[in-house]
């Protein structure tokens, strides 16, 4: 049983507390149990009904995603949504005050349950988030959220929450009118009792301490013409953000628009129908799988090291105060880690501090941080031109230039001055961590810790192990990555590791397609049409062509001629057309970005590659390389490849990941096309690897 009822002094209390689980979810059994309790209260005359959770930092985390994942029939999906709606209707129709007491996350169905209560109170708990994130799983709210939220907080605020799927914190919830009161967690029960006495004394009074919208905001919320403007602008914004790949946000707008003047019964019928249509789609199934995948890697533990307790890390040093080093220092300080930033001179340190402050400044502009908070966090970063202060740090993160000789010198020096327990980590994007470890005083403490740029935005971090890396070092580093809010993927030391190895094959193939007679903007458009956040040449300009070619040479030296840089790069690099940092690359980066005709002129005339062929070549070469990564046991399975490519490169989430996409193609088709491309080019880059041959032979896919 996961829902309990008790009654005292004419106040009923429903407590959600799922056994053997850290969270409460609304599965079929829980809804039946909750509904049975509510049915028994219909004829009671309680002073109030309180609904609460016994879980720490969790109210109700939402509907049971596993049950939704297993839905394959639209009629079944609608029936399940309607079952939840009926329970929420019963709650809403009770003849006495109902109060949701929220001291933890209230998401999806948990938020919808709170919306069905007459009142909602919340604590100042920093871990609280409340909202309707269903669109992130490819469907719309199904337990009445699209009906109740706009009627409670107004069309604009509700539309923003539902369409974005982004939950809000307690202060924002109170400001919008989503909750009626905020209380300290200490003495919460007494505060709730006082609140009940207050609403009992004046049953018709609204105690919400906020002012309703005025002027234009009120017009947009309440006038038919204003609402039309809201719908139009929201649709335009969604189409721009999703490029049409994600149907759920647009469907949510449609549901709210259609049901705005309808009865509850009619509106909920539209909602359940929309939920049913979306929940059975491949896009939704892929996004649900991605949800599980993300949760798995957020909570990643080291296999075989269950008894090892991670060392606490509260002090760090960053060597190299460039843009990346400054970004790492900002992330560390933002997560409460005291940071020593080292470079060869004070001018370089000043640039690193400026890079860190730029991130905070942007956060202040977006009202995500306050000036006094930024000042306190910047004070946690101190600069040095020597190794003073390094003796008591818990981890050192090397972020100097991508030159193995220089990195080895750094590791040889720093390993002599730090604590014997300190972790020594390299932020290298492609160089051998093993070779760095060889020169360290204790190679067991050396590990790769590869951030992606920009550090504060990119969620992925590659943790690279060598033959020397101890389990204690690995456990501590994985735990530290989680402390920084990053999603860690553990990778064996190999050229390019995971993400860059796969990604550079894609960029290199785009260069070959361009050399054959394509156009820069057309090839980029093909990639964006596939669902990637940007095309290969836009990405090259962002990273820097010199950086990309350097990594290709590392991969070529370590993995063979399939990574030999495309000829077009050899024509561009000597011209110093490095990309955004030099103002010119494949594009000219001015007020308006335009194709660089100087580069386009290097392309031979007469060639033409279709969109289908271009996508096939760029994506299939990545799939084959990913299979080689699995074959060489660089990572432990297809999950690691997919989370890495989604979070490290923006591979389209709606496709489920690179290898989920490969399975959707089918191994037979994949083999057939790879063999056809290999027959055409005959240079080995499309030759199906043994891993794929084995899958075909055994009639298997990447995911069993």
Image (cartoon, rainbow, N blue to C red):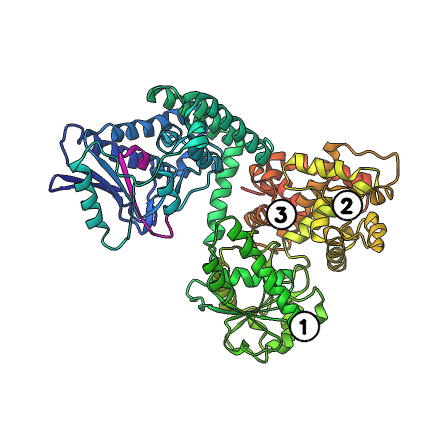
Q: Secondary structure at mark 3?
A: helix
Q: Secondary structure at mark 1?
A: helix
Residue at the spot 72% in from the left edge and 50% down from the top edge: 580
Residue position marked by numbered label 3 in the rendering: 649
Q: Earlier in the sequence, mark 1 or mark 2?
A: 1
Number of residues whose C-alpha sits closer than 10 Å to that of mark 2, classed few (under 14), some (14–19) or many (20 or more): many
Residue position marked by numbered label 1 in the rendering: 408
Q: Residue 119 colored magenta?
A: yes
Q: Secondary structure at mark 2?
A: strand
Return the x and y of residue 596 as percentages of the image width and height.
Answer: 80, 43
Please state, as top left, top right, bottom left or bottom right, where the N terminus lies in the image. Answer: top left
Q: Tell me: residue 537, above or below residue 31.
A: below
Residue 1 visible (yes or no): no
Return the x and y of residue 262 as percentages of the image width and height.
Answer: 37, 19
What is the spatial separation of the Cα atoms under label 2 and label 3, in whole angstroms? 23 Å
Number of residues whose C-alpha sits closer than 10 Å to that of mark 1, classed few (under 14), some (14–19) or many (20 or more): some
Residue position marked by numbered label 2 in the rendering: 588
> From which residue to which does the magenta span run?
113-129
Q: Please, which residue is most extreme toward the left here?
A: 9
Relative horizontal placement of residue 660, taking residue 607 as reference (left or right): left
Q: Earlier in the sequence, mark 2 or mark 3?
A: 2
């Amino acid at each position: 049983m996961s829902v309990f009822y008790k009654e005292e002094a004419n106040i009923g209390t429903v407590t959600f507390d799922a056994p053997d689980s850290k969270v409460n979810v609304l599965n079929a059994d829980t809804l039946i149990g909750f509904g049975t309790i509510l049915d028994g209260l219909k004829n009671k005359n309680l002073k109030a009904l309180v609904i609460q959770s016994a879980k720490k930092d969790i109210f109700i985390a939402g509907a049971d995603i596993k049950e939704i994942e297993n839905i394959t029939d639209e009629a079944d999906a609608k029936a399940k949504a309607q079952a939840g709606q009926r329970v929420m209707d019963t709650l809403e129709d009770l003849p006495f005050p109902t109060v949701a007491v929220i001291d933890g996350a209230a998401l999806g169905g948990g938020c919808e349950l709170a919306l069905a209560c007459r009142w909602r109170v919340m604590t100042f708990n920093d871990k609280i988030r409340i909202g309707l994130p269903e669109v992130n799983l490819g469907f719309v709210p199904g337990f009445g959220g699209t009906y109740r939220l706009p009627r409670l907080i107004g069309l604009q605020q509700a539309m923003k929450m539902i369409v974005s799927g982004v939950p809000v914190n307690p202060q924002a919830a109170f400001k919008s009118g989503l909750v009626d009161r905020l209380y300290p967690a200490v003495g919460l029960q007494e505060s709730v009792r006082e609140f009940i006495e207050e609403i009992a004394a004046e049953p018709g009074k609204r105690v919400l301490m906020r002012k309703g919208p005025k002027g234009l905001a009120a017009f947009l919320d309440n006038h038919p013409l204003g609402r039309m403007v809201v719908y139009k602008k929201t649709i335009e914004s969604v189409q721009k953000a999703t490029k049409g790949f994600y149907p759920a946000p647009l469907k949510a707008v449609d549901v709210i628009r259609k049901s705005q003047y309808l009865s509850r019964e009619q509106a909920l019928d539209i909602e359940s129908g929309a939920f049913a249509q979306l929940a059975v789609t491949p896009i939704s199934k892929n996004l649900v799988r991605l949800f599980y995948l993300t949760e798995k890697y957020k909570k990643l533990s080291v296999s075989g090291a269950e008894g090892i307790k991670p060392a606490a890390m509260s002090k760090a040093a960053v060597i190299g105060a460039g843009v990346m080093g400054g970004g790492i220092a900002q992330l560390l300080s933002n997560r409460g880690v005291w940071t020593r930033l080292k470079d060869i001179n004070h001018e370089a340190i000043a640039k690193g501090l400026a890079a860190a402050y730029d991130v905070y400044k942007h956060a202040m502009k977006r009202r995500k941080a306050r000036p006094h908070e930024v000042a306190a966090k910047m004070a946690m970063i101190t600069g040095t031109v020597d190794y003073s202060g390094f003796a008591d740090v818990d981890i050192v993160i090397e972020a100097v230039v991508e030159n193995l000789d220089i990195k080895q010198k750094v590791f040889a020096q720093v390993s002599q001055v730090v604590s014997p327990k300190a972790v020594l980590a390299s932020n290298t994007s492609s160089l051998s961590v093993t070779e760095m470890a060889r020169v360290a005083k204790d190679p067991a403490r050396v590990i790769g810790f590869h951030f992606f740029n920009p550090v504060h935005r990119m969620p992925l971090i590659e943790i690279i192990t060598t033959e020397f890396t101890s389990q204690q070092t690995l456990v501590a580093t994985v735990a530290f990555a989680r402390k920084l809010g990053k999603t860690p993927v553990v990778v064996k030391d190999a050229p390019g590791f995971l993400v860059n190895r796969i990604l550079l094959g894609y960029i290199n193939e785009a260069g070959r397609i361009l050399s054959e007679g394509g156009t820069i903007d057309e090839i980029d458009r093909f990639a964006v049409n596939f669902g990637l956040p940007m095309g290969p040449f836009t990405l090259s300009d962002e990273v820097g062509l010199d950086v990309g070619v350097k990594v290709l040479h590392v991969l070529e030296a370590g993995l063979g001629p399939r990574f030999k840089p495309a000829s077009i790069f050899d024509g561009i690099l000597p011209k110093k057309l490095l990309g955004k940092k030099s103002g010119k690359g494949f594009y000219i980066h001015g007020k308006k970005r335009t194709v660089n005709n100087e580069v386009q002129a290097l392309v031979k005339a007469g060639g033409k590659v279709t969109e289908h062929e271009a996508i096939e070549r760029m994506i299939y070469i990545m799939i084959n390389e990913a299979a080689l990564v699995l074959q060489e046991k660089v990572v432990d399975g297809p999950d690691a490849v997919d989370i890495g490519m989604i979070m490290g490169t923006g591979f389209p989430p709606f496709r489920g990941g690179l290898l989920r996409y490969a399975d959707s193609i089918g191994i037979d088709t994949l083999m057939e096309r790879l063999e056809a491309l290999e027959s055409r080019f005959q240079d080995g880059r499309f030759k199906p690897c043994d891993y794929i041959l084995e899958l075909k032979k055994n009639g298997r896919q990447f995911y069993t």
